[in-house]
Image (cartoon, rainbow, N blue to C red):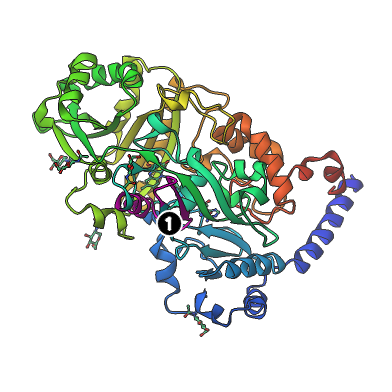
Amino acid sequence: MMKPQIAFALLLTFSSIAFASNKPDEEAFLRCLLKHSDDTTISSIIYTPKNSTFSSVLDFYIQNSRYLNPETPKPKVILTPTTESHIQTAIYCGKKHNLQIRVRSGGHDFAGSSYISEVPFFVLDMFNFRSISVDVKSRTAWVGAGATLGETYYSIYEKNSSLGFPAGYWPTVCIGGHISGGGYGALTREYGLAADHVIDARIIDVNGAILDRASMGEDLFWAIRGGIGANFVVILSYKITLVDVPENVTSFSVSRTLEQNAIQLVHKWQYVAPKLPKGLTISLLFSSNSSTQTGKRTIIATFVSVYRGGVDELLSIIGANFPELGLTKADCKEMLWIQYFPFHIGHSIDNVKEFLTSRVPPRKPYFTAKADFAEDPISEKGLEKILNNLFQVGPLLGQMEWTIFRGGVMDTIPKSEIPFPYRGRLLIMFEVVYWSANDTSDVIQSRIDWLRKLHRDIGDYVPKNPRAAYADYRDLDLGVNNVIGETSIEQARKWGAAYFDDNFDRLLKVKTQVDPDNYFKNEQSFPTLSSYSPTSEKSSV
Ligand SMILES: Cc1cc2nc3c(=O)[nH]c(=O)nc-3n(C[C@H](O)[C@H](O)[C@H](O)COP(=O)(O)OP(=O)(O)OC[C@H]3O[C@@H](n4cnc5c(N)ncnc54)[C@H](O)[C@@H]3O)c2cc1C
Ligand SMILES: *[C@@H]1O[C@H](CO)[C@@H](O)[C@H](O)[C@H]1NC(C)=O
Ligand SMILES: *[C@@H]1O[C@H](CO)[C@@H](O)[C@H](O)[C@H]1NC(C)=O
Ligand SMILES: *[C@@H]1O[C@H](CO)[C@@H](O)[C@H](O)[C@H]1NC(C)=O
Ligand SMILES: *[C@@H]1O[C@H](CO)[C@@H](O)[C@H](O)[C@H]1NC(C)=O
Ligand SMILES: *[C@@H]1O[C@H](CO)[C@@H](O)[C@H](O)[C@H]1NC(C)=O
């Protein structure tokens, strides 16, 4: 009886001493920044809640409106570095005064992990690191972490309209988060993920060292191409290789309701789409709305497609492989390759430069979302069960987007090439639910519960052990680090294996090598291997 009590009392004493000496001290952090910066203008990049522009700077890159409220934990300080030395100073002072760092590029993290923390923290806001330099001759580009996908696409297009980069759809998503988690989009079957096209990078490590591929070594270079940069370092920029795209493409977006055999068409799509030419991408969007024909609620499957070729060729490919779709010439629209980005999300394609280069996103919804990866085609019965969920929330509030991964270069790249492991899976499924500004907490909770139920239903049709998730679609339901104290490897494996499968163990080794004291922490960062060793477990009891 006595022993555990003594142990507990001792633990309390030790942990309160430890806590006192490591107490986060933002005043000391601020003094440290001013003292250790060789740049006298550093104060112009420091925002505290006392600065009148603090909230507008914080909110500008909060991309999920769910987190735009007073209850969301706020940083003590926001830094908007303009030089690399600002970042070195920030890391040095953050470590010294125990203020956690959250690095933000575009702020699209589903869980707001780049600007929310439960412990005292500062945001390192990377939007000034947005330079893009395209070299058409070598077909490469250096792209800053804070550059958006849209800016990247447009810069490449301006230099050579027949070159592109295989990455995601949303124009304001930034390079820093996107590439460091993988990055898929319309070119994935043909060319792979964004992270597959990284050939060099510049980073700043926990000791403030500025490193490139040669100096960081292949292990860390591997980890920051899909393992989430913020778990290891600060990413400054990536060097990417460009790919061939035709200047002109043909697109269509055709919707089919349940009454128009949506289930049968989706079923067939799963078999057909992986076998189509790699230059033909057909994604599927699902929602529920009232039918324009009957006026009654129905499920709508929208086939959104881009063919990197002409309309006649496209019609003959679809006619030969997927005649049930009933595609006509009138459904098809010839456009520039870069106009497919607005087209894909149902936006006007008229002012594509504005669409791609605006820093204001097309929408800033209230949402929560998840990912799944199917291995085998889902039966018609299974599709019905999954899709019927869309009737359980209001029109257009629940949505899914399915993208084919199989039948192209994704099948041939080894699963351990980068941390992203789910090569050759049939498809990735994105599941989302929305709400609006005026919804009560009960309504919001019911939407979140709805998404979890949808995810459980999908679970019957996708591989388990691990139940796969996508690192760029952060999902805190998978598990999180303890807010205070160490997290065991077994606990971290819950999300680590879901995102990275067999690559998780190598990520742990890299984490231990590059950030042994685990300064780069977030809800789903990785513990270091030493915290797992039996000796350290003993000494902490
Ligand atoms: C509307 C929308 C559409 C999307 N569409 C796609 C899509 O088509 N395809 C796809 O693959 N994904 C898509 N995503 C997911 C997107 O790729 C990820 O959310 C990505 O991480 C966002 O990067 P960010 O820099 O904009 O976000 P942030 O929130 O700034 O960063 C995300 C994560 O990366 C870390 N990070 C950011 N910058 C750095 C840095 N410089 N150094 C170290 N760590 C850093 C952050 O700390 C955080 O953990 C979409 C997301 C949204 C919200
Ligand atoms: C914030 O306020 C402090 C104190 O007035 C000032 O020194 C600093 O320059 C301000 N930051 C910005 C970005 O204006
Ligand atoms: C643009 O890129 C295409 C495709 O790689 C190439 O054939 C062409 O020569 C390039 N044009 C210029 C001007 O570099
Ligand atoms: C693309 O289409 C435009 C407009 O129809 C045309 O002027 C241009 O020549 C086309 N480009 C190529 C490479 O065929
Ligand atoms: C949904 O249905 C409503 C009512 O019929 C209609 O006004 C609206 O355009 C539909 N939206 C979509 C995206 O189909
Ligand atoms: C929310 O409520 C405000 C004030 O009543 C109203 O002006 C606004 O239109 C509502 N917004 C939505 C999305 O319902």
The magenta-colored residue range is 135-158
How many C-alpha atoms fall within 10 Å of the one at disc 1: few (<14), some, or many (≥20)? some
Residue lying furthest right in this view? 2
Instruction: Report ligand 6 position as a quadrant.
Output: bottom left
* Residue 136 covered by magenta stretch: yes
In the figure, is residue 66 to the left or right of 113? left
Residue bearing the label numbered 1: 133
Residue 314 appears in the rendering: yes
Residue in the image at 68% along x and 67% along y? 92
Residue 111 appears in the rendering: no
Front residue of 329 and 393:
329
Residue 339 in picture, x, y percent from top left: 23, 45
Residue 424 in picture, x, y percent from top left: 47, 23
Q: Work out whether 11 lies above or below 418.
A: below
Residue in the image at 59% along x and 46% along y? 524
Residue 182 in picture, x, y percent from top left: 49, 40
* Residue 530 covered by magenta stretch: no
Asked whether mark 1 and ligand 3 are closer than 8 Å, the reply comes as: no
> On the image, which quarter does residue 168 sit in?
top left
Q: Work out whether 194 lies above or below 147.
A: above
In the figure, is residue 479 to the left or right of 162? right
Q: Work out whether 505 lies above or below 368.
A: above
Q: Quadrant of the N terminus?
A: top right
In the figure, is residue 297 to the left or right of 121? left
Residue 363 in picture, x, y percent from top left: 29, 53
Q: Secondary structure at mark 1?
A: strand
Amino acid type, callout 1: Ser
Front residue of 273 and 517:
273
Q: Work out whether 514 lies above or below 461.
A: below
